[in-house]
Amino acid sequence: MSDVRYSTFLRHYKCMETTQFNQQILNSSDKLFRLAKSILRNADAAQDAVQDLIVKLWEKRFTLDEVENMQAFTMRSMRNLCLDTIRQQRDEVELPVEYEYKEPNPYHQIERKDLTTRIRIMIDNLPELQRTIIRMRDVEEMEIQEIAYITSLTENAVSVNLSRARQKIREQIINEQKRAEEIVWK
Amino acid sequence: MEMMNELLEKYFRGETSLHEEKELKKYFSGGNVASGHEIYRALFEEFDLELKDKAQVPFKKVLQKQQKPKRIWFQTFAYTGIAATLFLLLWIQLPNATESFAVIHGNRIDNTEFANRYAGKRFTKVTEMLAKSMKPMASFNKVRKGIDPLQNVSDVRNKMDELKDKLQFNK
Amino acid sequence: MKKIMTLVAVFLMVATTQAQTLQSLFDKYHNDERFEFVSVGKGMMNMANLFGGHAKNNNEMMSKMKSIKILTLNAEGASPLMKSVINELDKIVEKGNFETAVETRDKGERVNIYYRFTGNNDADMLIVTKEKGELSLIWITGKMTKEEMMHTFSMNGEILKSLG
């Protein structure tokens, strides 16, 4: 009985246990869902994507024990899975943006809810990398370091994209405001 | 106000820390927003709103569906399970397990042999069930043949009993 | 009277808040006429050289096993008794810090093997098999460390491979 076999066995044994898997992966399913939804811009597709990911990770759980930051790893895997999905679908159908963009009507009272939805559309209309980054930072409140790992970019690149995303949104907000004022004052 | 202005500018430059961003969120959710900042309120509210988005399906259920074990990882553990049960099977079959008994449908049976044999049968069953899940039906028979050598244990046991008798005879 | 009532109340409280353990589950049903129960005791370990050169190790290993208890229920899956026992079992596995070593599901047959180590190197292994009309629990206790248990299994895995 060689020692090599013995330690191979122990390595298999030390794999991620079911409870660990539940804790580390299933518990971040909401976060994963939001990420998928942001990238795919479709709630149903996001649901499917998360499901796919969980299954894939479950099957791989014996090697997952070697991963240091499980959360970051799953987020990264989620993004990559979504990007693959998009690439595949590009040949078939363009995934639609969930909401229709409506021109704001200044004659009606603009309710807070309408405004919020429009912000969501603005973010959804950003290129994927920027909207992923701005959401990871501003919604999920992640550190730049973590975002860099998930997107496979340098921290500097993340900051630059973050700033660009925020500036773009700001421009659109200001433009909308200007247009609303112009119409009112004409 | 001045401070908030600066903070906002810093934010759009992408230079704020998480702590500062939390400050901004707090500011915009409060009632004291300067008129010049009002247009950005919806933006920060949107972030809070999106955080409330939750997945629909309880994903634990998804996992339960996936429980069909895949060959690659499962073989290791199936071997463990089978090995464990075989091991225990042999352990039971050893002579001198003197304290075994059974209670069948409320009736106590103080017969070690019977109890051991019952236990042995159950272990064999477990082993077969594991082997079945592990390989497709075609090779199941092959696995079964592999398990059969265990039947030799009773042969061994007989031999041991013979040995014991011999020893006693020689005394 | 009051004293007795209070005592009873306290006793009931303790009894009901006491989580069910594997031991209490076995205690509950082993004399039940709907079940079959077998207890295999330790006895003397007088081994022959079954595993060739590994006999010595296995001797040690076997002396670490304390007992095997088997509880079997033959009943329809839909019967309230079956459902109740399965429910109790699930709770015990969950609350009792058991980990899963093997889980298989194949055409209505299920095998789950759980294990746990409690203080002082006490090891428990629980094999649960469920097929149509029958639920069986095999509970093994022993005294060994995690490493020792795994070592034995790896050795026996080799033997199994060589058999077939």
Image: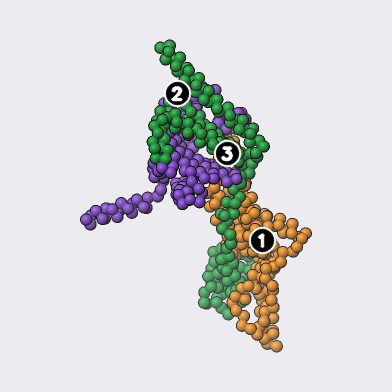
Asked if B42 appears above or below A52 in the picture, the reply is below
Q: Position of residue A58 (x, y in %)?
A: 60, 49
Foreground pick, A56 / A78 = A56
Check if mark 3 and mark 1 are on a common chain. Answer: no
Single out the mark in the foreground, 2 or 1: 2
From the image, tell me which residue sits under label 1.
A45
Q: Secondary structure at mark 3?
A: helix
Residue drawn at (62%, 80%) of the image: A110
For badge 2, the amino acid type reads Asn
> Which amino acid does the dot numbered 3 rest on?
Leu
Chain C: what color?
Answer: purple
Are the residues tagged 3 and 2 within 8 Å (C-beta)? no
The residue that appears at 61% across and 71% down in the rendered structure is B43
Are the residues under badges 3 and 2 in a single subunit? no
Question: Against A165, is C143 above or below?
Answer: above
- Residue C105 occupies quadrant: top right
The span from disc 3 to disc 2 (Cα, nearest Å) is 30 Å
